[in-house]
Image (cartoon, helix red, strand yellow):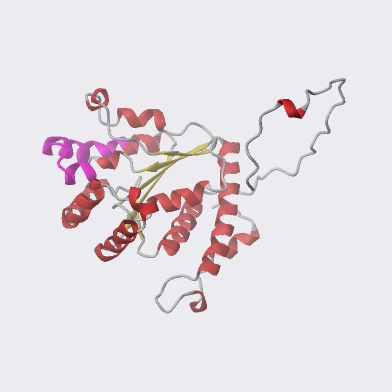
Amino acid sequence: MANKPSDALLWETPAGEENYKTSGQLRKSFYEERLAALQEELVKLQYWVHHHGLRVLIIFEGRGSAGKGGVIKRIGERTSPRIVRTEALPKPTEREQTQWYFQRYIPLLPSGGEIVLFDRSWYNRSNVEWVMDFCTEDQHQEFLRTCPEFERMLVRSGIVLLKYWFSISYEEQERRFQARNEEPLKRWKLSDMDLEEHRLYTRYSMAKDTTFQFTDIKQAPWYVVPSDDKRRARLNCISHILSQIPYEDVVPEPIEIPQREDAAYIRPPMREQTFVPQLY
């Protein structure tokens, strides 16, 4: 792996016992400190990817409320959306349903200098669609046969492919669903699909196990992220991403900000503009 800045040791060092609560969860102060350090490294990584024209695809999968969206949000907080792009496709249209299954994902793959984050992916076929009976058994079996070859093609083409499965227990998923249900401003996060998935928790476990059996391949292995503790899941996942892509600090030096050019121009009176009410 390429040499990293010396301060990288800050986020590579495991947390001490004093940084955990008696419940086993990370303390907020420690979490925020480590997250800031990791986000700084992500900025360095994006510069490296852009500078060298790398193509990086990161897939996030898991049950509803497992924490996929949370880690994606933290990755994107300080990085450029022009380099680090998130994709979350809705259900396929009638036209897309007639296409080769992988077809609608291909235009979203990273070009040179891009990192693309898939908030769910083509694995909808072997997980959500199979659990909810949205696909036939033949379609499910065809996916399991072709997906490994498809991903090997991506890797051979030079794409860096990382796959993360966020693993949440039945009890923690229920707790999060209850919390969303009790909070009016978060109730929109609780869909009918989430409720049905929770009811079919065991069937979803079967789907995940079958998916891993066929698609946990050497060229693109699955990495499981225990996510009952959201803070630990975010730090562990981001740390692992950084460890999988060799990079160096190529952040540009500060630039000189140009001064305004003088010009013979008189602006219209400000009273002619309409301003928003100054409530604050």
Q: Quadrant of residue 201?
A: bottom left
69 or 104, nearer to the observer? 69
Is residue 118 inside the magenta stretch?
no
Res 221 seen here: no
Q: Which residue is drawn at 48% across and 55% down?
A: 238
Q: In which quarter of the image is residue 175?
A: bottom left
Residue with the most extreme top position: 264
User: Residue 235, position in %: x, y?
Assistant: 47, 60
User: Residue 164, position in %: x, y?
Assistant: 36, 51
Q: Which residue is drawn at 33% across and 40% down?
A: 121
Q: Which residue is drawn at 44% across and 64% down?
A: 232
- Depicted 178 relative to depicted 217: above or below: below
- Depicted 30 relative to depicted 259: above or below: below
Q: Residue at x 45, y 76 (%)?
A: 21
- Depicted 203 relative to depicted 52: above or below: below
6 or 91, nearer to the observer? 91
In-image side of 230 versus 6 (left or right) = left
39 or 53, nearer to the observer? 39
Is residue 131 inside the magenta stretch?
yes
Q: What stretch is highlighted in magenta?
A: 126-150
Res 36 seen here: yes
Q: Is the magenta stretch mostly helix, strand or loop?
A: helix
